[in-house]
Image (spheres, rainbow, N blue to C red):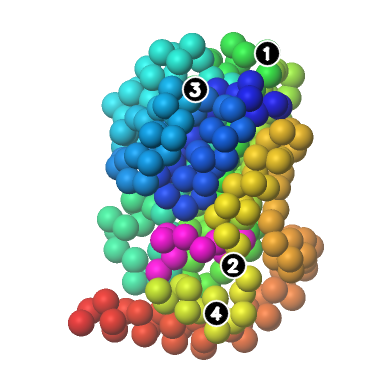
Amino acid sequence: MRLPECAVILTGASGGIGLELAEQLCAAGARVLAVSRQMGKLADLMNRYPGRLLWQSADLRHHEGREQVLARAREMGGVNVLINAAGVNRFALFDQIDAQALDELLDINLKAALQLTRVCLPLLRAQPRAMVVNVGSTYGSIGYPGYATYCASKFALRGFSQALRRELADTSVSVMYAAPRATRTAMNSTAATALNQALKVGMDDPADVARAVLKAVQSERNELYLGWPEKLFVRINGMLPGVVDRALRKQLPVIRRYITSHSKESSK
């Protein structure tokens, strides 16, 4: 797909990877409906790209928010790309996450993406060529201690992407699942960042992730996995999960130490 010919709905557009996607899309000539609960840093981008970048405040967990996005998309004359990039994370042991936080994570990471895709499909199918892009994670393929709920949401998003791609195989709509590795965004807690540094986990810049995602959009790829050796671990985990089980078991004391340290700091 040629980016100057794209009219895009972009969720999670006010920070991290979403903000970089918004900027790079606009710079490439696309029209973007940026969706987020707060405008935040999008205000500067809107001044730089008047008429090309629109903003819609919406809580995608609720029907009303999704209908607001759909109405704005219709006002634009339709869209041919939907990028589900909204997401939240929690670095904690599973029994430390309360019911409200668990529901919020699944609502934002998974249910909002499915529901928005559902209501936008008629607009996308009306286009000669269209694409749904679901931004997942390496943790959508590798279950990692300290991220059980987050992994659950991203595993499900990956499965949804694969099934929907096959369901729409004889239509004009393609589906891509993009899986970044650890990325330097505000979504990471202090403890999560410290753990990544202790384990020497590579962390990508959001601008580089956005650039790779948009390159994959242009070539209409089905899947995108970022980072080495993370891409290798995804394959090993798929074929020999026991090998990864043993490797991660060795990391458990370090993971628990950083989670415990963060919990004590939060309770002060």
Task: Specify the segment rendered in magenta.
Answer: 181-189
The amino acid type of the residue labelled 2 equals Met
Looking at the image, is mark 4 or mark 3 nearer the viewer?
4
Of pointers 2 and 1, the one earlier in the residue sequence: 1
Q: CA distance from mark 4 to mark 2?
A: 9 Å
* Label disc, if present, on residue 128 of the rendered structure: 1
Q: Residue at x 74, y 61 (%)?
A: 231
The answer to whether residue 67 is seen in the rendering is yes
Which tag, 4 or 2, sits closer to the chain's start? 4
Residue at the outermost left position: 268
Question: Residue 90, image x and y in percent?
Answer: 40, 63
Tell me which label, 2 or 3, sits earlier in the chain: 3
Disc 3 + disc 1, Cβ < 8 Å: no
* Residue at mark 4 to residue at mark 1: CA–CA distance: 46 Å
| Main secondary structure along the magenta-highlighted residues | loop
- Whether residue 134 sits left or right of residue 111 in the image: it is right
Q: In what element is the residue under mark 1? A: loop
| Amino acid type of the residue tagged 1 in the rendering | Pro
Q: Is residue 238 above or below residue 53?
A: below
Q: Is residue 70 visible?
A: no
From the image, tell me which residue sits under label 2. Answer: 203
Residue, disc 4: 197
- Mark 4: which amino acid? Gln
The residue at which mark 3 appears reads as 120
